[in-house]
Image (spheres, rainbow, N blue to C red):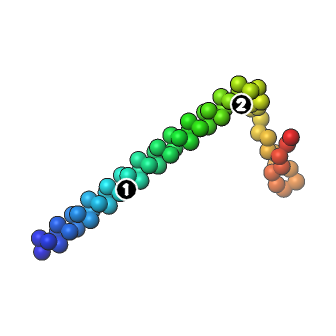
Amino acid sequence: MPELAEALSLVALVAATLEYAILIRHREERRDAIRWQMQVQESLVAAGTETRTPIRRWSQGRFRIER
């Protein structure tokens, strides 16, 4: 019976480690996405092409891209 308890403890430890690794990976991916968005925004502002209005508008039952 002690072997079963040790095996279950090991499985729980591995599961917790994997869950933590996935959480850390998700946070890092989110940080990268935020950094990328900021860089794109800064580039658009620097180029003078940044607009505050959306380029897609709802028209005739669907979104249309305005050019």
Secondary structure found at label 2? helix
Residue density around tag 1, few if under 14, some if 14–19, many if 20 or more, within 10 Å: few
Residue 1: where, in percent of width, then height?
12, 74
Residue 51: where, in percent of width, then height?
76, 31
What is the number of the mark on residue 44?
2
Residue 47: where, in percent of width, then height?
74, 27
Is residue 4 found left or right of 19 in the rendered image?
A: left
Q: In which quarter of the image is residue 52?
A: top right
Is residue 19 found left or right of 36 in the rendered image?
A: left
x 76%, y 26%: residue: 48
Q: Between marks 1 and 2, how big is the CA–CA gap?
A: 38 Å
**Does 41 appear above or below 24?**
above
Amino acid carrying mark 2 in the image: Leu
Disc with the residue nearer the chain's start (1 vs 2): 1
- Looking at the image, the residue that sits furthest to the bottom is 1
Secondary structure found at label 1? helix
Q: Do the residues labelled 1 and 2 touch (CB within 8 Å)?
A: no
Number of marks in the image?
2
**Does 34 appear above or below 14?**
above
**Does 9 appear above or below 53?**
below
x 41%, y 47%: residue: 24
Is residue 26 found left or right of 38 in the rendered image?
A: left
Residue density around tag 2, few if under 14, some if 14–19, many if 20 or more, within 10 Å: few
Amino acid carrying mark 1 in the image: Glu
- Looking at the image, the residue that sits furthest to the left is 2
x 32%, y 61%: residue: 15
Residue 8: where, in percent of width, then height?
22, 68
**Does 48 appear above or below 40?**
above
Q: In which quarter of the image is residue 57?
A: top right
Q: Name the residue under label 1.
A: 19
